[in-house]
Amino acid sequence: MEIEPAEEVKEPPRIHRLDESVVNRIAAGEVIQRPVSAVKELVENSLDASSTSISVLVKDGGLKLIQVSDDGHGIRYEDLPILCERHTTSKLSKYEDLQSIKSMGFRGEALASMTYVGHVTVTTITRGQLHGYRVSYRDGVMENEPKACAAVKGTQILIENLFYNMVARRKTLQNSADDYTKIVDLLSRFAIHHIDVSFSCRKHGATRADVHSVATPSRLNAIRSVYGLSVAQNLIKIEASDNDPSSSVFEMDGFISNSNYVAKKTTMVLFINDRLVECTALKRALEVVYVATLPKASKPFIYMSITLPPEHVDVNVHPTKREVSLLNQEVIVEKIQSVVESVLRNSNESRTFQEQTVEATPSVPSVTNNDLHLSPSPPGSKSQRVPVNKIVRTDSSDPAGRMHAYLYKNPQKYLGRDSSLTTVRSSVRQRRNLKETADLTSIQELINDIDRKCHSGLLDIVRQSTYIGMADDVFALLQHNTHLYLANVVNLSKELMYQQVLRRFAHFNAIQLSEPAPLQELIMLALKEEDSDLESNENDDLKKKIAEMNTQLLNQKSEMLEEYFCIFIDSDGNLSRLPILLDQYTPDMDRVPEFVLCLGNDVEWEEEKNCFQSLAAALGNFYAMHPPMLPNPSGKGLEFYRKRKHGKHTQDGGNSCHVDGTAEEDEFEHELLSEAETAWAQREWSIQHVLFPSMRLFLKPPNSMASNGTFVRVASLEKLYKIFERC
Ligand code: ADP
Ligand code: MG
């Protein structure tokens, strides 16, 4: 950018009134952003006119032609001259009416806008008339007197050459092929809500309609005819309501997809007081529930209709009325979220428990045969795989023996070798599919343990408290009713992650490492790190040996690690994938070496339940929201970044970018400092936006947290001030 010489003082630019037609065109561009917005306005007008049948015809993605025909009450002859003027409407007369408005439209802007950016022709007939009228409009006014014409009941509105006078917009839209798709999507949404109206949507020249619905009393029928059987058969009915004026008043009903539904993108069809709207907060909240509750990584299908007292909805917050603002939105979102969560959990559990349990028998071969026999997976490597519940206990004091614990080439060799094997083995559930969740008793037991040990008082605090902020590097300040609590985010996140590992067991999405990391080097790094902490001096050869052995051990376990925990180790011994425990959260990669070492050293590989528990704990510890390795620059940690006087370690050396920095600024390691600032800011963001919302949904705080300092009640306001002083 050119820097202007300071001396030249610029005259302030003249202010003038915009030409009326410019104003109108600008405003029109806001209401009618794309062809689909025109279709939405027209269909809403048809609905407002009490139509029972609405059909849409589209040519060239809507740019060439959009035609919406309905069988509604029509438009009076005497209203035609002002029909397309701005702010002419039959739906609202005084501002207060907005409070109770039931119609979709009320601004009297849509038709007018269309005449500023396209050519509009209206054909309409009212009840009892022998003929209808046809008239065209441009820039808000009639182009000619209405002409009498033959007409069927209702109104037909034709928009031609949309955006003919907005070159840039037309160009961008011409290149995007998806406007017709958007129109079809829009009509599909309307069709499953207004089930007493028939809808159709067709491309010009096509013989078949892409949306075709007939009026039906059954919502599910409507969904089936619009979205297909694969959607309709995988839905659960859902209802919720609240009638407490001090918190929220609403009624909700709808359908949500169950665990068999599979889709890559969320479909959320939301109507609030019969208005098709978007509510990002609600959508996100429900997606979070799906991700956490259902084993498959599928996005949901949601149809939801919410009714609120009209005075609780501000419909006038968005020019296209696409967004509305609700009174008590947060409370409503939370309530709906918890209903969806419990419905899903129930459906999920009932599904899991339908599976039969095959009791472990003392005879090893029969279990093995049973398992292989019952598995529907095609013969091949998968069905040959030895499941983890058949881990063979070898001498746990012999590290070499440990390597055989999970996978061995020929299971037959071990059969009957040790009858105590069967006592180690938990009861084996019938496994229809290797990927079914919670079909391992041990995991179910660990999850039951979490439920059993849950502290109800703490659960209430976790669910109902408000996050205020971080009090220091480890403690967050929470408000619960009239009390303030300090909560240890490291302990809490560790526990949450541990629980998530068990809940998502075998159904993780993956984080792909940008570069595969060699296990052996990671372990070496961790050992060296440990060494410098302890100031002991084990020799390098020994470390190498340990690293080698641990790598070998993890290679042996790689199949189990991948299948159940999404920890992928390739054949060259590189770590390349890690599981996602919470959406939008990746662990601090500086901790990978420590984690890998911990996998080798701390996991109890010999017995199934202990193995899963210690693995979940290791992951929990790794993913926990520890303070970043770099000291916090917003506190005393700032000193760490001050350049040492004779230090040769300035990261950016003679960095010429700082030529005009002041002397004071130059005393800091800028690169490191900004890295630290980012790391701390990111952590704080994650704590507020990922950790606490997820805890509210999923964490079952164990009894131990009541006494181990995870929660500390702040006794008085006075103390609170002290905490703030520290920040
Ligand atoms: P709004 O819907 O906000 O009132 P519009 O510009 O969309 O404003 O429409 C202006 C008026 O035209 C409406 O108030 C309605 O009286 C009339 N109108 C528009 N479309 C139709 C239709 N399909 N059937 C009957 N009347 C219509
Ligand atoms: Mg309208």
Image (tube, helix red, strand yellow):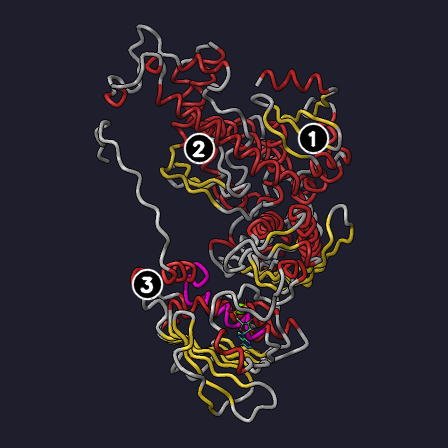
- Specify whether 251 is left or right of 155: right
SS class, disc 1: strand
Residue 253 higher or lower than 516, as above or below? below
Residue 249 higher or lower than 211, as above or below? above
* 3D distance between C-alphas at marks 1 and 3: 53 Å
In this view of the protein, can residue 436 be seen by the observer? yes
* 3D distance between C-alphas at marks 1 and 2: 49 Å
Residue type beneath disc 3: Met
Reading the image, the residue beneath label 2 is 552
* Residue at 68%, 77% in the rendered image: 217
Rendering coords of residue 412 (x, y %) = 55, 48
Reading the image, the residue beneath label 3 is 166
Closer to us: 490 or 305: 305
What are the residue bounds of the magenta stretch? 30-47
Residue 683 higher or lower than 112, as above or below? above
Q: Earlier in the sequence, mark 1 or mark 3?
A: 3
Closer to us: 346 or 99: 99
Residue 273 higher or lower than 45, as above or below? above
Reading the image, the residue beneath label 1 is 479
Rendering coords of residue 366 (x, y %) = 64, 54
| Residue depth check, mark 3 versus mark 2: number of the one nearer the observer | 3
| Residue depth check, mark 1 versus mark 3: number of the one nearer the observer | 3
Q: Is mark 1 within 8 Å of ligand 1?
A: no
SS class, disc 3: loop
Residue type beneath disc 1: Gln
- Specify whether 445 is left or right of 61: right
* Residue at 47%, 38% in the rendered image: 556
Residue type beneath disc 2: Gln
Within 10 Å of the Cα at label 1, are there few (<14), some (14-19), or many (20+) other Cα atoms?
some
Q: Earlier in the sequence, mark 3 or mark 2?
A: 3
Closer to us: 514 or 22: 22
Q: Is mark 3 within 8 Å of ligand 1?
A: no
